Image: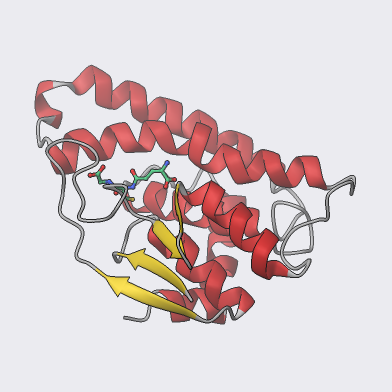
Amino acid sequence: MLTLYYAPRTRSVRIRWLLEELDVPHELKRFEFSPPSKPFSQDTPSGKFPYIDDDGIGISESGAIIEYILERYGGGRLAPPIGDPARGEFLQWLHYSEATAYPPLGVVIWHTMYKKNADDVPEIIADARQRAEIALEVIEKALDGKDYLLGKDFSAADIMMGFTIAVASFLGVLDERFPNIAAYYDRLTQRPAFQRAIAD
Ligand SMILES: N[C@@H](CCC(=O)N[C@@H](CS)C(=O)NCC(=O)O)C(=O)O
């Protein structure tokens, strides 16, 4: 049985959402997130959320966990197959969410919510917000005329991106300059599997 170490409002929502979309039997090990004063401080085997234990196989990193679950339990769902022309774009967005779009948002969170010293480092905050906006502009453009990142089909790349967009929205970086992202975010949050993943 797959166990997900889960804390609400963290990247572990991505994994719970994917498990709900795929209807994979799993157990949730529930925690409350403790705002860290240093990284890797959570009470999980990796010190971070998310973490999974799948019959003794332990994995951290939300992108890696998503790829693992798709390979093991996806049965071809929610990702173009290896060799498909859409596969490259799928991998690009899967990783863009965490490797490019999230880091500047993480800087804002770190200083405003964890270190609580944002007023002492205004240039760092302004620079991070600007970098986050530029990363969102790339997504805004990519979504032009599309329902999802790959076009009409929802994929696991949208799950990765959904959490990043939720954080951008929470921090007020997502504003009226990004109508395509706002409509996309609405579409994502209306999905029944997303609703189940955040229900309790
Ligand atoms: N790149 C990692 C980031 C994991 C991460 O930083 N998770 C946050 C919660 S969203 C965390 O556990 N932070 C607490 C800490 O580092 O103590 C991933 O995608 O899983």
Residue 79 is left or right of residue 81, and the answer is left
163 above or below 195? Answer: above
Tell me residue 70's x, y (percent).
66, 61
Q: Residue 147 occupies which quadrant of the picture?
A: bottom right
Residue 120 is left or right of residue 74, and the answer is left
Q: Residue at x 79, y 66 (%)?
A: 76
Residue 39 is left or right of residue 188, and the answer is left
Residue 127 is left or right of residue 178, and the answer is left
Tell me residue 24's x, y (percent).
57, 78
163 above or below 193? Answer: above
Q: What colouring does the structure picture have?
A: secondary structure
Identify which residue, 182 or 132, lies in the foreground. Answer: 132
User: How many numbered discs, if any?
Assistant: 0
From this viewpoint, which residue is outermost toward the top? 123
Tell me residue 117's x, y (percent).
10, 30
Identify which residue, 166 or 76, lies in the foreground. Answer: 76
Quick one: quadrant of the C terminus? bottom left
Q: Residue at x 54, y 48 (%)?
A: 63
Tell me residue 5's x, y (percent).
34, 64
118 above or below 18? Answer: above
Q: Is residue 190 visible?
A: no
Identify which residue, 177 or 42, lies in the foreground. Answer: 42
169 above or below 102? Answer: below
From this viewpoint, which residue is outermost toward the front? 56
Q: Residue at x 68, y 38 (%)?
A: 92
Q: Is residue 79 visible?
A: yes
